[in-house]
Amino acid sequence: MSMKGCKKTFNFGSIFLVFDRKAGITNSKLEYLLLSEEEADPNKPQIDEERNEILFNPLSDRHLDHQLSSYEGAIFNVAKGQELFSNYVHYNGIDGWASGIQDLRAECRGEKVGTVVKVEGIDL
């Protein structure tokens, strides 16, 4: 059973991609967020180069969870009743990039189950 969101079937992510598209920007700095698990290079984490070096900022850090989750929404048209699926490529960060991509590929091929299935004991 293939995981939803695999092979670019995700429809939820950074809404700034939508803004770029509406503005006619075709070479957005955010295009790396649309990488599928098969397109992502396990040996080269894809990050926003401008945010590569982030300085400590107590005010920003206090609201980090809000900042990281406030700019996500439907990035493609979603039909009534359709489920939302994220692109899980970037969920492991830089430190877990290689293993995360390999795990995600195996999950998308149906060779292993993801964390939620493991934790909740869902029977597929």
Image (cartoon, rainbow, N blue to C red):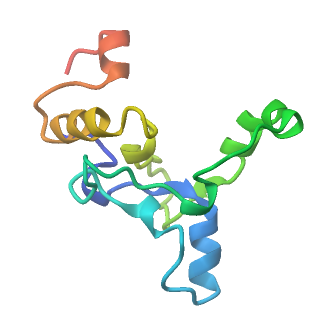
**On the image, which quarter does residue 105 sit in?**
top left
Q: Between residues 110 and 34, which one lies in front from this camera angle?
A: 34
In the rendered structure, the answer to whether residue 38 lies left or right of residue 94 reads left
Q: Between residues 36 and 58, which one lies in front from this camera angle?
A: 58
Q: Between residues 77 and 25, which one lies in front from this camera angle?
A: 25
Identify the residue at horizontal 41%, vertical 62% (top origin).
Answer: 34
Identify the residue at horizontal 58%, vertical 58% (top origin).
Answer: 14
Q: Residue furthest right?
A: 59
Q: Residue furthest bottom?
A: 24
Identify the residue at horizontal 37%, vertical 32% (top origin).
Answer: 96
**On the image, which quarter does residue 4 sit in?**
top left
Decide: is 55 above or below 22: above
Circle count: 0
Q: Between residues 124 and 98, which one lies in front from this camera angle?
A: 98
User: How far across and how far down the image is residue 84, in percent?
Assistant: 47, 48
User: How far across and how far down the image is residue 23, in percent?
Assistant: 64, 86
Identify the residue at horizontal 19%, vertical 22% (top origin).
Answer: 124
Q: Quadrant of the N terminus?
A: top left
**On the image, which quarter does residue 108 sit in?**
top left
User: How far across and how far down the image is residue 2, in percent?
Assistant: 19, 40
Decide: is 15 above or below 82: below
User: How far across and how far down the image is residue 19, in percent?
Assistant: 65, 75
In the rendered structure, the answer to whether residue 84 lies left or right of residue 41 reads right
